[in-house]
Image: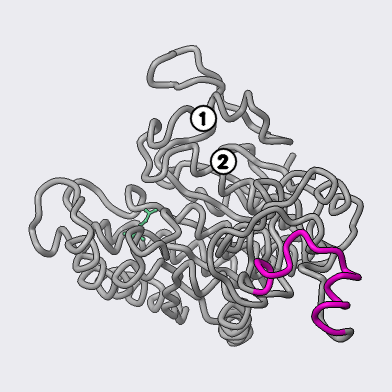
Amino acid sequence: MRNFSKSRRVVIKIGTSTLSTNDGVNPAYFVTLAEQVAALRESGRQVVIVTSGAIGMGAKRLKLAGPVVDMKLRQACAAIGQPLLMHEYYKAFGECGLIVSQVLLTAEVLSKRKTYLNLQNAVETLLRLGVVPVVNENDCVSTAEIGTAFGDNDKLSALVASKIDADLLIMLTDIDALYDKDPRQYPNAKPIRVVEDITADIEKAAGKKGSLHSTGGMKSKLAAAQIAATAGCRIVLAHGQEPDIITRIMAGETVGTLFMPKGKLSNRNRWILNSKPEGTVRVDAGALEALRKRKSLLPKGITGIEGHFEVGAVVMINDAAKAVVSLSADELRELAGRHSAEIRDRLGQDRRDVAALPEDIVFLTP
Ligand code: GLU
């Protein structure tokens, strides 16, 4: 039996297909959603919603047929659809006595420590006021072309759950569980009720991107589950159209697929791990081994620098780790390969020579 009685902070991610029918947005859905969220609020839980649907609603309003692929048109559709989407939340949640708020994010906002902390303050304040934050990507200004997009709301929901230390992330989609093989191809496919670890076999079962209908597909759901799991957050993936699905999940019913959390990383380490790297620092094998033993990154072991970044940026260390650098790309280019003694002899005793401190380095795999 699953037990979520102690989960105080819950993020609910809702996909476009869940919110709408073929004829457009489904107002009845917002009503049942609002009723279930109101019940959660009454039981003392804080709820954050991550919603999709802005682009779809904008496209419907413009009477566009078929999926919108042109980037500029997607931006325009998002700008049209987002207020329509919020209007549905405002109406349905208002009927249940709940206040909703709109929070639009870009990957850049979450990657920069200052803006991320700023966002955290705003969300914490909204939650303290008993308001339900409704989060979406700011699709009008953040696009894959300029490299600021999350890509999909699965990832966004996991990052939000991680950043606000949620105990549970409920991902509502158009499939009722993760299966051991593609259920559309294999009638004997079996649902997997609990995933302890996202292994290669589980990834294989999920298939390719988009192979299971929903926007990002099961693959992006697994990537999202990985992010949330390292934040100590449990994830339940379930069919959004099943009656009272949120209430049933919270009551511990065995529906959907439950992904178990992993050892919880600190908030700062999670921020480093989930930030978009601004460049790469290449190091030799000896230096990488030293970093694994929690030593500082010194210029001596650096073999190359890729990209332009300033002090405080998050960068990749080879393909193995992410780190916050204490020196800029230009400084590192000047110092790469030199011994600390040589650096001090040539550049002065007070010259800093640590490229990254151990507490600022996080390996992608333990
Ligand atoms: N942010 C997009 C929208 O509101 C949806 C992205 C997704 O479905 O993953 O339309």
Q: Which residue is mark 1?
A: 206
Residue 146 lies in quadrant: bottom left
Tell me if mark 1 has few (under 14), some (14-19) or many (20+) residues whose alpha carbon lies within 10 angstroms of its own: many
Residue 111 x/y as whole percent: 57, 70
In the drawing, does residue 172 fall left or right of residue 39?
Answer: left
Give the colouring mode of the picture: one colour
In the drawing, does residue 68 fall left or right of residue 130?
Answer: left
View extreme (front): residue: 346
Image vertical order of residue 121 relative to residue 65, above or below = below
Q: Amino acid at mark 2?
A: Leu
Quadrant showing the N terminus: top right
Tell me if mark 2 has few (under 14), some (14-19) or many (20+) residues whose alpha carbon lies within 10 angstroms of its own: many
Residue at (47, 63) in percent of width and height? 50
Tell me the magenta residue range: 331-348
Q: Is residue 43 visible?
A: no
Residue at (40, 62) in percent of width and height? 147
Residue at (74, 56) in percent of width and height? 302
Q: Is residue 342 magenta?
A: yes
In the drawing, does residue 199 fall left or right of residue 285?
Answer: left
Image vertical order of residue 89 relative to residue 210, above or below = below
Frontmost residue, 201 versus 352: 352
Residue 143 x/y as whole percent: 33, 63
Q: Amino acid at mark 1?
A: Ala
Are the residues flagged by discs 1 and 2 in contact, CB closer than 8 Å?
Answer: yes
Q: Earlier in the sequence, mark 1 or mark 2?
A: 1
Q: Secondary structure at mark 2?
A: helix
